[in-house]
Image (cartoon, helix red, strand yellow):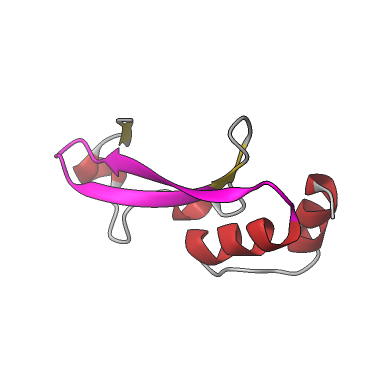
Amino acid sequence: MTLIEAIAEWKSKKRKHGCVRATDFLCKRVPGFKPERLTRYTKGGELFQHVVATDGIIRVDLDPESDRPKDYNPKNDGDIVFRP
């Protein structure tokens, strides 16, 4: 299956599974893609992680809504900071 076909299949149904299951969905269908865990911090220094699929060149995030802590409040926590 191609990347475009996998994304179309994902979007064909209303899904809300979280970043890990979304990444597993894509990695099982598209050869060469693996999960990559990204470390993020809130303005206050709170650590959280987000998982995306990558082939080493392209990063695909099927669940971008999950790219924040569960109790994230932009007024209190500020912007999300990415630190590689």
65 to 38, vertically: above or below? below
Q: In this view, does 65 lie to the left or right of 27?
A: left
38, 75: nearer the viewer: 38
Q: Which residue is drawn at 33% across and 30% down?
A: 84
Q: Residue at x 14, y 39 (%)?
A: 44
Q: Which residue is drawn at 74% across and 53% down?
A: 30
Q: In this view, does 6 lie to the left or right of 14?
A: right
Q: Does the magenta stretch include residue 50?
A: yes
Q: Residue at x 65, y 69 (%)?
A: 15
Q: Where is residue 4 in the image (x, y as percent from the top left)?
A: 82, 46
62 to 70, vertically: above or below? above
Q: Where is residue 65 in the image (x, y as percent from the top left)?
A: 50, 53
15 to 68, vertically: above or below? below
Q: Where is residue 43 in the image (x, y as percent from the top left)?
A: 20, 35
Q: Which residue reaches farthest left?
A: 44
Rendered image quadrant of residue 28: bottom right
8, 29: nearer the viewer: 29
Q: Where is residue 3 in the image (x, y as percent from the top left)?
A: 78, 47
Q: Main secondary structure of the magenta part?
A: strand
